[in-house]
Amino acid sequence: MQTLNLANILQNKFIGTDDLRKDLSAILLNTLPKEKRLVITQHGQPKGALIDLDTLIKLEDLEDEIDVCADGQSVAW
């Protein structure tokens, strides 16, 4: 599993809130399928992220598995 740190964040494509607002349709159609995740900046500072739907589903599945493990049940990886 990848650890969240500055080096990992910097490997992603960045987009400002103004560009995101202006070009959201094109970003969803063209950029997000290739990049898988975009870091959203506001005034040059990272503030959030936009991820593709497949990545979101995988993250939610992983979160469910972690919750099950936290409850003391075993999970087959």
Image (tube, helix red, strand yellow):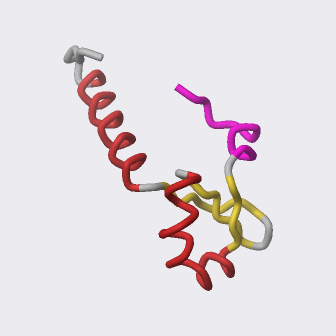
Task: Say which quarter of the image contains residue 60.
Answer: top left
Residue 7 inside the magenta-drawn segment: yes
- Determine the residue positioned at 23% across, 18% down: 75
- Determine the residue positioned at 70% across, 60% down: 14
Residue 36 inside the magenta-drawn segment: no
The magenta segment is 1-11
- Give the image location of residue 12, x and y in percent: 68, 49
Q: Residue furthest left?
A: 73
Q: Looking at the image, is 47 positioned above or below residue 74?
A: below
- Give the image location of residue 45, x and y in percent: 76, 63
Q: Is residue 68 left or right of residue 4?
A: left
- Give the image location of residue 21, x and y in percent: 59, 82
Q: Is residue 59 left or right of residue 17?
A: left
Quarter in which the C terminus is drawn = top left
Q: Residue furthest bottom?
A: 22
Query: Exactly how many numbered labels are in the figure?
Result: 0
- Determine the residue positioned at 30% across, 38% down: 61
Task: Say which quarter of the image contains residue 6.
Answer: top right
Q: Looking at the image, is 29 positioned above or below residue 7?
A: below
Q: Is residue 47 left or right of residue 70?
A: right
